[in-house]
Amino acid sequence: MSTPLLEVKGVTKRFAGLTANDSVSFSVNEGEIVSIIGPNGAGKSTLFGCITGFHRPDAGEVIWAGRDITGFKADRVCRLGIARTFQIVQVIADMTVLENVMTGAFLRHPRRRDAQRRGLEVLESTGLAGRRDQQGSALTIADKKRLEVAMALATGPRLLMLDESMAGLTPVELQEIIALLRAVRKTGLTLVIVEHVMEAVMQLSDRVVVLTSGRKILEGTPAEVVSNPAVIQAYLGERYRA
Amino acid sequence: MVKISLAAAAVLLALGFPLLFSGPFPLHVAIVTLIFAGLGVAWNIMGGYAGMFSFGTAAFFGIGAYTSTWLSTAHGVNPWLGLLAGGAASALVAAAIGWPCSNLRGHYFAIASIAFAEIVRTHFNNWKLVGAAEGLMIPIRDGGLRVFQFNQSKAPYYFIALAFLALALLACRAISRSRMGYYFRAIKESHELAMVLGISFVRYRLAAIMIAAFIAAACGTLYAQYVLYIDPESVLILSVSVQVVLVTMLGGAGSLFGPVIGAAVLVPLSEITRAQLGARGTGVDMILYGALITLISVYQPKGIWGFFAGGLPRRKRPAPQPRLEPSSPGVA
């Protein structure tokens, strides 16, 4: 078997006595979609932060394409090919949609004309081409989330990490973004998503990693995970144990 | 069309100003206006675009003025070379202070910038080598462009100041259209967002500070060569820094011509009211000045440039939203 694209080995992160991640390990192969699920406070976003350079793990390693990138700063992690979005959507409010995406595209296309061309391509593929001249601040939440994905894609990543990109969307919007992520994967990208919306997790994931109280309790296919008693207990509590 | 004719009128007025108003006072006001417009452009690059709200511009202005003046009085160095040396010194100091401050955001950066500028002022106030509190005097000699000194008329200073401003504007425009300009705006929006777009915000913040420091220092040399006398109270004082912020904020921070418009309104107002009313010691000039600032902030928080940008058809209205939005029944 070839080496995985991303390997997380025993990552531990403590905040003043609270262990947010307790020796978490998992790996992601090229072309996969892996979801990380778990109740609120399970440490999903912290784990994201440890991988993408926002937190330095207290122990453990993050291996990217065979290279140890533990503790690298976020901008460096991005340059190496890992892009991410935020749980609370972030776009540049006083830029147009195209300018937002160009800001991402400048990473691999330093010249303005090239960045603009790449930006337009990304807008086309993410269904935002019709909004290119709107201000970032004028978009609906659904479009802001879409734009955030577009900005991340414009940086030319191999791995895209999405932190709750599907929360709070209408059913129609949800299906649109699922279709978008499927299309993104078809272009050869690998995805890791933190998600509460089980509908999306079930439809998209090849594998699911379940965190509870900072620990990985299970890893498997979506079908395996949702029928597992430990997962049901973690989500619904002791009384609902099957 | 409207924009082009406005721009042409502005350029003609700028070039013809010394012919229309040949008296020393109007020209003096115009030169001071141009210098503050230049300082405003410098501030705008770091404050308006990159979001680093600084009250320390006077330090860079002063370092530029002191470097070229000291080099020319103590070592006979040509002021034009002194200008470059002052710019370099200022940019180096900016890098040295900007590095440890690169993680400071918002108000904290502003506070640090005040502290930095006051430390520089206090230091120069006690630094014997550069005349301490007495400052430095540039001896009058045969004037000419080569020695950056003109004794017959103020007009050459006016045109040099105009050329400086034009250069600063060209630099600002080039930056704003380049990757660097986009990165500055991303950093202004959010450090986290900038980082996930692969932007080293430390590097780009330093670049913004150093570019601003260089331009401000060049303005400092120009000021010193114009007035021929500098001391800490004239070039390093906090009120200069505050004036620069006001000029840019009121003109329109983050827009190319904002600082120019702000300076064209505020500097003549403050110079004229001070000349007319200031001597009585009643503070009427300051009251008028304050009232204008308040009015603009209330009615156009984006600055005077906001009136232009909003009034001209710059951008198409957003297209109607075709997507389903259950909360708004008016949209089919």
Image (cartoon, grey):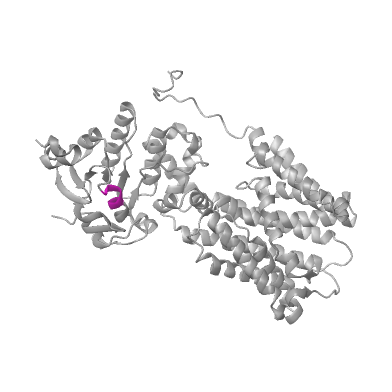
**Residue in front for this viewpoint, A108 or B309:** B309
Q: Main secondary structure of the magenta part?
A: helix
**Residue in front for this viewpoint, B249 or B256:** B249
Above or below B223: residue B176: above
Q: Residue at x 31, y 31 (%)?
A: A174
Q: Residue at x 52, y 52 (%)?
A: B184
Q: Residue at x 67, y 36 (%)?
A: B299
Task: Using the rendered image of the protein, determine whether residue A209 is visible from the camera's viewpoint.
Answer: yes
Left or right: where A194 falls relative to A224: right
Please count the marks in the image.
0
Q: Residue furthest left?
A: A242
Left or right: where A167 falls relative to B114: left
The N terminus of chain B is located in which quarter? Answer: top right
Specify whether residue B239 is painted magenta: no
Q: Which residues are magenta?
A: A43-48
Above or below B161: residue B190: above
**Residue in front for this viewpoint, B261 or B11:** B261
In the rendered image, residue B162, in percent from the top left (x then y), is placed at 75, 56
Task: Using the rendered image of the protein, determine whether residue A28 is visible from the camera's viewpoint.
Answer: no
In the rendered image, residue B71, in percent from the top left (x then y), is placed at 71, 77
Above or below B138: residue A236: above
In the rendered image, residue B230, in percent from the top left (x then y), is placed at 77, 70
The C terminus of chain B is located in which quarter? Answer: top left
In the rendered image, residue A33, in percent from the top left (x then y), is placed at 23, 43
Q: Residue furthest front?
A: A239
